Amino acid sequence: MNKFKTALIAFWKDEDGLTTVEYAIAGALVGAAVIAAFQALGVEVGNVITTITSTLSGA
């Protein structure tokens, strides 16, 4: 029983898992920022292509 208690206390104090969770959260935030940037960029690229198409078809 004493070995089990010691192992349980050691597991409880182990903070390696916390580091993994922090990296996962940071990765998710970076991913969300990249997705938002690409969506905004996609709208701008679409507007430029529409302008070029309109200009070329009017010429």
Image: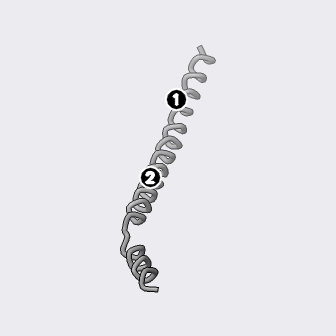
Q: Quick one: quadrant of the C terminus?
A: top right
- How many numbered marks does the figure carry? 2
Q: Which residue is mark 2?
A: 27
Residue placed most toward the observer, 7 or 41 = 7
Depth-wise, is mark 1 or mark 2 nearer the camera? 2
Instruction: Look at 43% across and 50% down and name the residue there.
Output: 30
Position of residue 25 measured from the top left corner of the image (x, y, whole percent):
44, 59
Badge 2: how crowded within 10 Å, few (<14), some, or many (20+)? few
Q: Earlier in the sequence, mark 1 or mark 2?
A: 2
Measure the C-alpha gap from mark 1 to mark 2.
Answer: 31 Å
Question: Which three-letter amino acid code belongs to the residue tagged 1?
Answer: Val
Position of residue 36 measured from the top left corner of the image (x, y, whole percent):
49, 48
Position of residue 8 measured from the top left corner of the image (x, y, whole percent):
44, 78
Q: Which residue is mark 1?
A: 48
Q: Is residue 53 above or below residue 13?
A: above
Q: Hey, which residue is sitting farthest top in the picture?
A: 59
Q: Is residue 47 above or below residue 6?
A: above
| Horizontal arrangement in the rendering, residue 44 relative to residue 58 (left or right) | left
Q: Label 1's element?
A: helix
